[in-house]
Image (tube, rainbow, N blue to C red):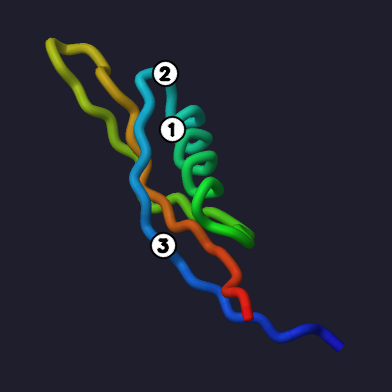
Amino acid sequence: MSEKRVARVTDIIAASPTSFEDAIKVGFERATKTLRGVTGLKLNEMRVAIENNQILEYRVRMEVIFVLED
């Protein structure tokens, strides 16, 4: 029989001057510093900030899914 769990979802935005992949890692690493029981991420949006016709920053908005503790 599977155990019963309840999860919560929190939206976060993370950024990196390097790549979308790095922005995801930055967001994940920061989220796991304060949230316990992280079970997944869902990418909702990917954007870039542009300045002087150059990509300045890669940004991602994602949902962090984590299990609530008893």
- The secondary structure type at the circle numbered 1 is helix
Q: Is residue 30 left or right of residue 57?
A: right
Q: Which residue is mark 2?
A: 18
What type is the residue that disc 2 sits on? Thr
Compared to residue 28, the image places residue 36 above or below, namely below
Q: Which mark is residue 23?
A: 1
Q: Which residue is mark 3?
A: 10
Mark 3 and mark 2 residues within 8 Å of each other at the beta carbon:
no
Rendered residue at 48%/38% (across/down): 24
Which quadrant would residue 18 be assigned to in this image? top left
Q: Circle 3: is it few (<14), some (14-19), or many (20+) Cα within 10 Å?
A: few
Q: Residue furthest right?
A: 1
Mark 3 and mark 1 residues within 8 Å of each other at the beta carbon:
no
Q: CA distance from mark 1 to mark 2?
A: 8 Å
Residue 4 location (% of width, % of height): 71, 86
What type is the residue that disc 1 sits on? Ala
Rendered residue at 34%/45% (across/down): 13
